[in-house]
Amino acid sequence: MMKSQKLYSLCYLLFLLICPFAFSQDSLSTSVMTQQQAKITEGDGWVFYEYFTADTYGTKNALTGMAIIQPGKEIHPAHEHFEEEYLMLTQGSGVWTIEGKESDAKTGDILYAAPWDSHGIKNTGDQPLVFVVMKWQSKGVPEPQSK
C-alpha cells in the first residue's frame, strides 16, 4: 500500500472513531409535540406551554412555547437576555415594551428581540392575549456581552 493510501486509511479510521463523539450530543429530531405533551406553568393570570427546549442542529438554549395572558396581566415585566427571540401575537391585543418605549400590540404582530435588548408584552385588551415564542442561541456564535 502506498504511503498516501495508508495516511488516507488512518485519517478515515480516526474520523470514524471521533465522529460519533463529536455529534453525540443530544439534538432535537424532526417531531411534533402536542399541547398535551407541553410542560405547563401557571401564574397570576397567565399560562405558559413550554414545548421544545432541546438543542437543535444549529441552536442551543432554545425555547419554544405559547402563552395565554388574561386582561390586565403580564407574565413578567420587560426583561433582557443574551438569546435572540421572536414573539408573535396570535390573539388579542396589548402593549409592547421595547427598550423602555411602549407601542400597541395587535394580533398578527411579531417582535424580534436582539441580545440584551429590553422587551416585553402586557395584555391591555378585554380578551385573552396569546403569543408564540421562539428563543435561542446559535451554536458557534459567542455569547454577546451585555450593553
Image (cartoon, grey):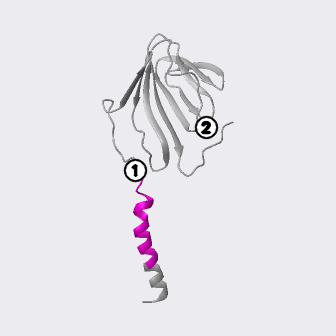
The answer to if 111 sits in the magenta stretch is: no
> Horizontal and vertical percent for residue 8?
46, 79
Label number found at residue 116? none
SS at badge 1: loop
**105 over 53 or under it: above or below:** above
10 Å crowding of disc 2: few (<14), some (14-19), many (20+): some
Where is residue 77, by image quadrant?
top right
Q: Residue at x 30, y 30 (%)?
A: 36
Q: For this rendering, which residue is in front, 4 or 144?
A: 144
Pick out the residue farthest to the top.
126
Q: Which residue is mark 2?
A: 115
Q: Which residue is mark 1?
A: 26
The answer to if 20 sits in the magenta stretch is: yes
Pick out the residue farthest to the left.
36
User: Would residue 95 appear left or right of 7 to someone viewing this image?
Assistant: right
- The amino acid on which the numbered mark 2 sits, given as a three-letter code, is Pro
Pick out the residue farthest to the right.
147
10 Å crowding of disc 1: few (<14), some (14-19), many (20+): few
> Horizontal and vertical percent for residue 123?
51, 16
Q: Residue at x 61, y 19 (%)?
A: 103
Q: Which quarter of the rendered picture does the C terminus lie within?
A: top right
Give the mark nearest the N terminus, 1 or 2. 1
**First to last magenta residue range:** 10-27
